[in-house]
Amino acid sequence: MAVFTPEQQLRILSDLVAIQSANDHELQVANYLAKLLGDHGITATVLPAEPDADHKQAEPDRANLVAEIGSGAPVLALSGHMDTVSVGDADAWTSDPFTVTERDGLLQGRGTTDMKAGLAAMVIAMIELKAQGLPRKGTLRLLASRAEEVGEYGAKELARAGYMRDADALVVGEPSGWNIIYTHKGSVDFRLRSQGTAAHSSMPEAGFNAIPPLMEVLVRAQQEFNARPASDPVLGELTFSTTVFHGGDQVNTIPDAAVAEVNVRTIPQFDNDEAIALLKGLVGEQNRRGARISLDPYMQEPVVQAPRDSLLVRLATKLGERISGVTTPVVGVAGVTDASSLLRGKGPDFPFMMFGPGNETMHTVNENIDKQMYLDFVQLYQRLFVEYLGQAG
Ligand SMILES: [Zn+2]
């Protein structure tokens, strides 16, 4: 006898979507899940947020949550984030973004696909297993994080607190649909500040223009990154994008400051360290010629590479195809997940996959999820988790 009817499973998803957690307020999601888990005999720990790179003081309405069932080895870690991106243009939505609305088998609302459905499916699966006295061997550990969309601070806190130390494998419930993702790109965000000396533009030689050397770094960087022959057979090309540029404030004043931000999406053949070294070299060149440019790689998420043929992936393929009736390709993606932070120090043999309900509407207006896919993942996770713990190690 299942604990939850499909209607109740949909209710839980609706409740989660109703909690507005766009890069904040994860504590409310955590409290909701802790209550739900607690009502079914599973103790959850709500961990208050720490100060992070964006905030000198911890924010009061933010938190991570950890919950376990079973005991001993092996330990299968389950990762899901509690934040969403913002609604965007609320008027462009065809329904209230915080009220799950069903249309043609799709459930619409902010965070349905990314990733409150995946998070709900993991929590419900744990409750259903616990009620059946499962798992008989090993531990399931839910790591529900904050701030995945901005900074991955929650995953970093969980990793620092040691929750991955004894983990034997990791499933990230981000929306893959019926694809199994075993590798994804890395990402580095850089801020470059160029310091100049202001002067009247009638006497530019009396000052130092902060813009040209910074522009030169950016143009050279674009050329150098484009010239890299490195490409990954699964992940494709490394990409470099200048995404922010500010400099100067008046047409007849030589600007004393310019700032740029760039994002590099890295691959195993050219990783974060190499990207940082390349930009450092270009900045150093300009600085030797008199510029004063600082380079801050303020967010670094490493490339994630895991075995393509792990037990985890094999079981997911078997169960995914059986439950969905379609083939479940094993592939890579460009997007970065909490795995970048959770897998730090784990090495390329560590079993990982991203496998969760959802579609390509993440972050968009009218984000939605296929209702049946959500319910199917609740079933799939239960079997996957128990079969994995039963057969691993
Ligand atoms: Zn996500």
Image: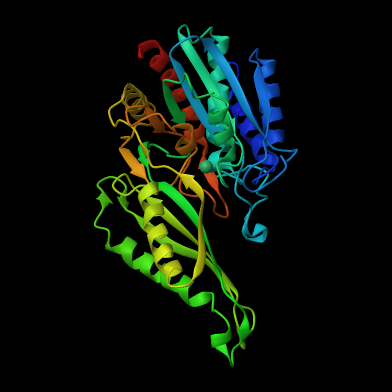
Residue at image location 33% in from the left, 47% down from the top: 267
Q: Quadrant of residue 102?
A: top right
Image quadrant in which you'd find residue 225: bottom left
Tell me what residue is drawn at x 46 percent, y 48 percent.
360
Q: Position of residue 196 (x, y in %)?
A: 57, 74
Looking at this view, is 114 or 192 the one in front? 192
For this rendering, which residue is in front, 99 or 350?
350
In the depicted view, which residue is nearer to us: 82 or 225? 225
Q: Position of residue 122 (x, y in %)?
A: 53, 26
Residue 323 rendering spot, x and y as whole percentages: 39, 27
Residue at x 40%, y 59% (from the top left corner): 279
The colour style of the image is: rainbow
Q: Residue furthest right?
A: 60
Q: Is residue 296 above or below residue 141?
A: below
Q: Is residue 374 above or below residue 108?
A: above
Q: Quadrant of the C terminus?
A: top left
Whether residue 382 can be seen here: no
Q: Nearer the viewer, residue 274 or 331?
A: 274
Question: Quick check: 317 left or right of 63?
Answer: left
Q: Position of residue 380 (x, y in %)?
A: 44, 24
Query: What residue is rendered at 35% in x and 50% in y?
Result: 274
